[in-house]
């Protein structure tokens, strides 16, 4: 982030937390950690601290070195939840938990009552369980498909930025 901020003359560097956002860039992390309140600094102070030039930007060689050393300037994506995980999460809602408790209570009451031998006495509790499971399955499947659609949309809308390389403004694609 600091590298991208330095490439634009009018930008201020965003505040970076060295432990949370600098996992793969130890040199940059150290440089940012040494800088007190980078978002409060002027572009000239950042230019001096990071040993760059706002007018000419980074050289192509420097940019390639930073890329090889620190990796791409992108946020780490959290792992996509599995369908099973989404299903289990659907079962943790307050109303769903109340329905499961009501179904268990219905089965327990009917199992200890005078008509415990009659299988039809358990239909209410079993029906609640079946409806809850079907509802959770449909909701998990819908959420899974919505996540896939959102991922496809993010791949279609690739952002571009302008950076200064070797004194020239260059249009660069940003990974989605």
Image (spheres, rainbow, N blue to C red):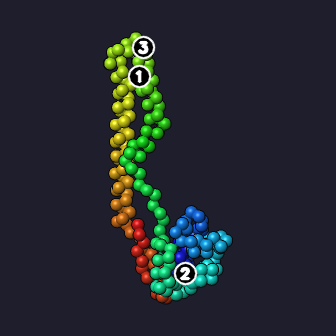
Tell me the residue that label 1 is attached to.
Answer: 107
The local secondary structure at tag 1 comes to helix
The relative height of residue 65 versus residue 128 in the rendered view (above or below) is below
Which residue does the image show at 50% across and 78% down from the upper left?
Answer: 66
Tell me the residue that label 3 is attached to.
Answer: 113
Is disc 2 surrounded by few (<14), some (14 to 19) or many (20+) residues within 10 Å? some
Q: In the picture provided, is 31 more to the left or to the right than 4? A: right
Q: Mark 2 or mark 1, which has the lower sequence index? A: 2
The local secondary structure at tag 2 comes to loop
Which residue does the image show at 38% across and 54% down from the upper left?
Answer: 147
Which residue does the image show at 36% across and 26% down from the upper left?
Answer: 126
Q: Mark 2 or mark 3, which has the lower sequence index? A: 2
The relative height of residue 118 versus residue 59 in the rendered view (above or below) is above
Residue 125 percent coordinates (x, y): 39, 25
Which residue does the image show at 38% across and 39% down from the upper left?
Answer: 136
Tell me the residue that label 2 is attached to.
Answer: 9
Task: Give the Cα distance between marks 2 and 1.
Answer: 70 Å
Task: Give the Cα distance between marks 2 and 3.
Answer: 79 Å
Task: Give the Cα distance between marks 1 and 3.
Answer: 10 Å
Residue 111 percent coordinates (x, y): 41, 18
The local secondary structure at tag 3 comes to loop
Q: Mark 1 or mark 3, which has the lower sequence index? A: 1
Q: Are marks 1 and 3 in contact (CB under 8 Å)?
A: no
Is disc 3 surrounded by few (<14), some (14 to 19) or many (20+) residues within 10 Å? few
Residue 151 percent coordinates (x, y): 37, 59
């Amino acid at each position: 982030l600091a590298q991208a901020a330095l490439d634009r003359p009018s930008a201020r560097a965003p505040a970076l937390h060295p432990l949370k956002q600098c996992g793969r860039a130890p040199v940059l992390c150290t440089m940012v950690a040494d800088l007190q309140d980078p978002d409060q600094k002027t572009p000239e102070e950042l230019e001096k601290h990071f040993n760059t030039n706002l007018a000419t930007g980074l050289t192509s060689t420097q940019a390639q070195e930073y890329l090889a050393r620190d990796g791409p300037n992108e946020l780490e994506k959290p792992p996509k939840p599995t369908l099973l995980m989404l299903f289990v999460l659907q079962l943790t809602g307050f109303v769903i938990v109340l329905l499961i408790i009501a179904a268990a209570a219905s089965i327990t009451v009917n199992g200890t009552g005078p008509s415990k031998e009659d299988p039809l006495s358990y239909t209410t509790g079993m029906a609640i369980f079946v409806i809850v499971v079907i509802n959770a399955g449909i909701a998990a499947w819908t959420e899974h498909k919505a996540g896939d659609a959102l991922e496809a949309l993010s791949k279609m809308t690739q952002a571009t930025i302008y950076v200064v390389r070797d004194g020239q403004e260059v249009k660069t694609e940003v990974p989605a």
